[in-house]
Image: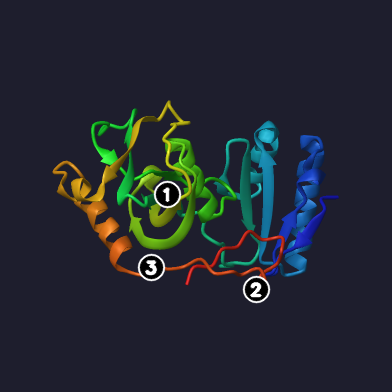
Amino acid sequence: MLLTKEDLYNGLIIDPQSTQISSQNFKKLLLSLLESSKKERKNLLWLDLTTQQHQHIAIAVELGFEFHNCEAQRITLTYQVKDNAYIPVPPTHTIGVGAIVINDKNEILLVRDRISSNHSIYKLPGGMVEHADKLSDAVEREVYEETGIKAKLIKMVSVLNSHPYRFNKSNMYIVFQLEALSSKINIIDTHEIELALWLPLDEFFAHKEMSEFQKDLVRQALDKEGILLMENELYFSKKQHVEVYA
């Protein structure tokens, strides 16, 4: 049989290990599960399959499953057992982080892309949040990889939401201010970053080719308290990677 566990919303999640069977048996057992889930008045079925299980994917679609989301080697499908049962929307956003790092000499840390179409323009260090990243880990990592500077998060400065972005999804660009813990520049990601430097703040604000948007972000960081990272270990399960900004 296909093993399942209940979710919080009267749905069933099919155990991926129990799908490691022949296509013939998979179809037979999936039909049986569909029948029993209807009798038990479940809302949804969730099914994870790998790219190696392409025959299983075809069978699931044939029986009424629909694509929900996917990764490079895995796809999640859903089956609506109850008519009009709510299906949570697939991931809608990518998340990028930017870093405002100002040292004790009143200089700001900037980088210049090697591969961007605007490779002659300086910008704030930053990049994409990766799977399971904490925001603080992501922005500190990006600063280190792009400049070699070790830095520690101080506060959240700004959140920008834009649509459409890549693949017709939305993007959130979250900017933080960080404290520099070192000063010597040593670019780690030389494939992406051509140059990194400390630039005096007065030159940064006077620079005609510098983005006005980035200048406004830095002004916000200098003039306002921002949103701080709370100590939150008491509020959530230790199994969760949770950060609260307030």
The answer to whether residue 90 of the structure is visible from this angle is no
Q: Nearer the viewer, residue 39 or 2?
A: 2
Left or right relative to 29: residue 70: left
Q: Read off the residue under disc 2.
A: 235
Q: CA distance from mark 1 to mark 3?
A: 18 Å
Quadrant of res 58: top right
Q: CA distance from mark 1 to mark 2?
A: 26 Å
- Tally of numbered tags: 3
Q: Which of disc 2 and disc 3 is earlier in sequence? A: 3
Amino acid type of the residue tagged 2 in the rendering: Tyr
Label 2 packing within 10 angstroms: few (<14), some (14-19), many (20+): few
Q: Residue at x 25, y 34 (%)?
A: 118
Q: Residue at x 77, y 67 (%)?
A: 39
Left or right relative to 89: residue 224: left
- Image position, residue 70 (x, y; %): 57, 44
Q: Nearer the viewer, residue 224 or 184?
A: 184
Which label belongs to residue 226? Answer: 3
Q: Read off the residue under disc 1.
A: 96
Q: Residue at x 41, y 45 (%)?
A: 126
- Image position, residue 165 (x, y; %): 35, 47
Label 1 packing within 10 angstroms: few (<14), some (14-19), many (20+): many
Q: CA distance from mark 3 to mark 2?
A: 22 Å
Q: Secondary structure at mark 2?
A: loop
Amino acid type of the residue tagged 3 in the rendering: Gly
Q: Is residue 17 above or below residue 104?
A: above
- Image position, residue 200 (x, y; %): 25, 46
Quadrant of res 221: bottom left
Q: Is residue 167 above or below residue 55?
A: below
Q: Secondary structure at mark 3?
A: loop
Amino acid type of the residue tagged 1 in the rendering: Gly
